[in-house]
Every structure is written in C-alpha cells, then in structure tokens.
Image (cartoon, rainbow, N blue to C red):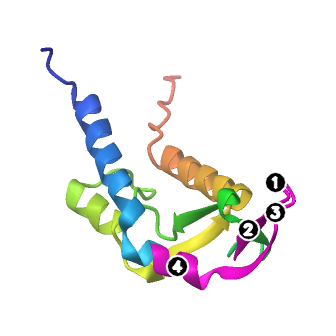
Amino acid sequence: MTEWTEGRKRSFIVSVLRSGTRRWPPKFLTLNEAKTEKKINVKTGRLAQHYLCAGCDNDFPAKDINVDHIIPVVGPEGFVNWDTYIERMYCDKENFQILCTNCHTEKSMGERQSRKQKHVAPVKKKKA
C-alpha cells in the first residue's frame, strides 16, 4: 500500500468531519427556526417545507438552502490547526444561519477571495 500524502490525509479527515455535521443538533435547531410554511415548490409542483434565507429574506425549499457557518470554519487567516477547525465546524447554533444557494455561493466566494488576498506573496521590487 502506498503512503498517503499530507494533502490526501487532510482531505480524508475533512471529509469525515464534514459528514459528521449531518447529525449535529445545533444545525437542526437552526433549520427548524428558519421554517416558514409548507407550500408548492414551483420547480417540482409538490408541497414542500420552505425556509427563510438570512441573506435575501426570501423563502426556499430545502433543496435550495444551505446551513452556513456565520464565522467560517477556515477564516481569512487560512487553516490554523485541527482544534480550531473542529471547534468552528461543530459550533453552537448562534454561528449557523440559513442561506439560499445564491447567497451561500456569494458569501463563500467572498471568503475564498479574502483568504487568497491574505496569502498572496509580496511583489518583489525590481532593482533600478
């Protein structure tokens, strides 16, 4: 069997930790509090529970929402350590919010940009 690279190990651990959040109780409390009403989903024509997006204040069916960490698991400083990662991943309900897919995508892109800007190597000045 070949040795795993550090990147592969890290990816595996992140995957396992993320799958565990599917059963994290504060996540479900946040979902329950964001429920609006059951109404017809325009995409499927079926009755579906809808949830209020904290970003745009519209309501969406479950397939079109995400439970988002308000304070990102990996912040602008990048990966700190596993203890910080786990603490942020398995946070209290106060750090969760419901976002529609569009709002979540926008927020995530902003967070990625912020991390990239923080980790950009300084530009070397040319000698005159």
Looking at the image, residue 113 sits to the left or right of residue 91; the answer is: right
Q: What element carries label 3?
A: loop
Amino acid at pointer 2: Ala
Which quadrant, please, contains the N terminus? top left
Residue that carries the numbered disc 4 in the rendered image? 30
Distance of mark 1 from mark 2, alpha carbons? 9 Å
- The residue labelled by disc 2 is 48
Question: From the viewer's perspective, is residue 41 above or below residue 78?
Answer: below
Label 4: how many residues lie within 10 Å, few (<14), some (14-19) or many (20+)?
some
**Is residue 47 within the magenta segment?**
yes
In the image, residue 36 lies in the stretch drawn in magenta: yes
- Please tell me which residue is depicted at 56% across the width and 75% down the height of the picture: 31
Three-letter amino acid code of the residue under disc 4 = Thr
Residue at 28% from the left image edge and 68% from the top image edge: 87
* Disc nearer the start of the sequence (2/3): 3
Q: What residue type is labelled 1?
A: Thr
List the residue tagged with mark 1: 44
Q: In which quarter of the image is residue 57?
A: bottom right
Question: Which contiguous range is marked in magenta?
Answer: 28-51
Q: Assess disc 3: are there few (<14), some (14-19) or many (≥20) residues with their C-alpha within 10 Å of its C-alpha.
A: some
Q: Of all residues shown, which one is farthest toward the front? A: 46
Please give the count of numbered marks on the rendered protein.
4
Q: What residue type is labelled 3?
A: Asn
Looking at the image, residue 34 lies above or below residue 81: below
